[in-house]
Image (spheres, helix red, strand yellow):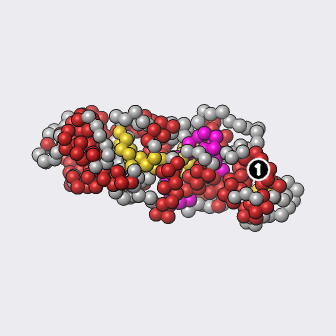
Amino acid sequence: MIAFELGADAARRALATAGIGDEPDAARERYATVVWCRLIEPGDSVAGRIIRSRGPVGSLEAVLSGSDLPELAPRELAEARKRWLPRLSEDAIADSLATARTRGVTLVTRADPVWPEQLDDLDAHAPLCLWVRGDPSTLLKLRGSAAIVGARASSRYGEQVATELAADLSGTGTPVISGGAYGIDGAAHRAALHAGGLTTALLAGGADRAYPAGHTQLIDDIAQRGLVVSEVACGSAPTKWRFLQRNRLIAALSGATVVVEAGWRSGSLNTAGHAATLSRPLGAVPGPISSATSAGTHRLIREYGAQCITGADDVREMLGLATRRGTAPIAPGSYTGEETRVRDAMSPRVWRDAGDIARRAGMAADAVEVILGLGLLDGRVESGPAGWRLRGIGA
């Protein structure tokens, strides 16, 4: 038997370091959940089964005492204890809770009213808890969200499409979820923020630390205006396994998943696989047949029945929302008038880069890029190596 304090007083003392106060029984359950979070890797179905059967406290007490667990075969239990018990550290648990308080990270468990129930579709592979930067109540707004994911080494085309989709969707009330990475993820998050919409970043490491480091400001911006979420405790490092397991949360938390760009073996296909397993709608954006970054999306369309996504209305259809087909693109910030300014700054004959168009229109470059992206999907403008021009005479 391993000595470890799980009493109500010990639990409340430990949770107090994170500014968490609970009734005695609730405190024990919450603290046991934190302990489990430090013992296991994401997606551990063995832990998930016994916790669902006995609860966080009962299952942890049984594991620490060396008791038999009828839910598990003896060998399965023995192997699990070998994985879990070397990680038991009161100091590590205390450090995670202290870091959570310092970084403004909130612990959310199934006992909380803001728990997003769609995650429970993962069954034994569901997360035990979520560590959240931002307003936890926002989790309840994510059921009808769209996940926009894709290659880190994305092309200009892929980033344009991700920007267009995220700006249109988030600007008209559909939250956008992604993984905070370079490439497609970053483009989707930035577009949602620029559009004034809601975006959520699911991280593979602790919610207290930005990964990649180059996205520190972006992650901070998302935390201030949306959510940064992780299932691993604060202080945890991102690993390859955690990235793969994080993808199941992206698929489960959202109402539909769209892969914008992906290589033949891209990690984004892992997210798509989780979406398919959960029977969530899955879409993929087609690209040039010569582009290696679109080989994976073409594979999803051809072999896995992903819906072909050519615009935000296609995503809205997957989510069961009303579409705006046949109407001019609408984006936040009264883009109807701003779209006219952008078109007036363009030519059907002369290619101009986005900076030049922004200068001629008297607008911010990032706002112009969003409108250009929407125009590309709408077929009103075209892009090429030399920049942008109106589709029409001289095209």
Q: Is residue 132 left or right of residue 310?
A: left
Query: Residue 171: x and y, percent?
Result: 63, 44
* Residue at horizontal 73 percent and vertical 47 percent from the top: 335
Q: Give the magenta range.
A: 164-184
Relative depth, front residue between 233 and 348: 233
Query: Residue 281: x and y, percent?
Result: 55, 38
Label 1 neighbour load within 10 Å: few <14, some 14-19, many 20+: many
Q: Is residue 20 left or right of residue 199?
A: left
Instruction: Tell me the residue that label 1 is attached to.
Output: 339
Q: Quadrant of residue 237?
A: bottom left
**Label 1 amino acid?**
Glu
* Residue at horizontal 68 percent and vertical 54 percent from the top: 367
* Residue at horizontal 59 percent and vertical 49 percent from the top: 192
116 versus 44 height, above or below: above
Q: In the rendered image, is residue 182 in sight?
A: yes
* Residue at horizontal 39 percent and vertical 50 percent from the top: 104
Q: Is residue 155 left or right of residue 227?
A: right
Query: Residue 54: x and y, percent?
Result: 24, 34
Query: Residue 205: x and y, percent?
Result: 39, 55
- Please say whether residue 175 is one of the residues in the magenta stretch: yes
Relative depth, front residue between 124 and 92: 92
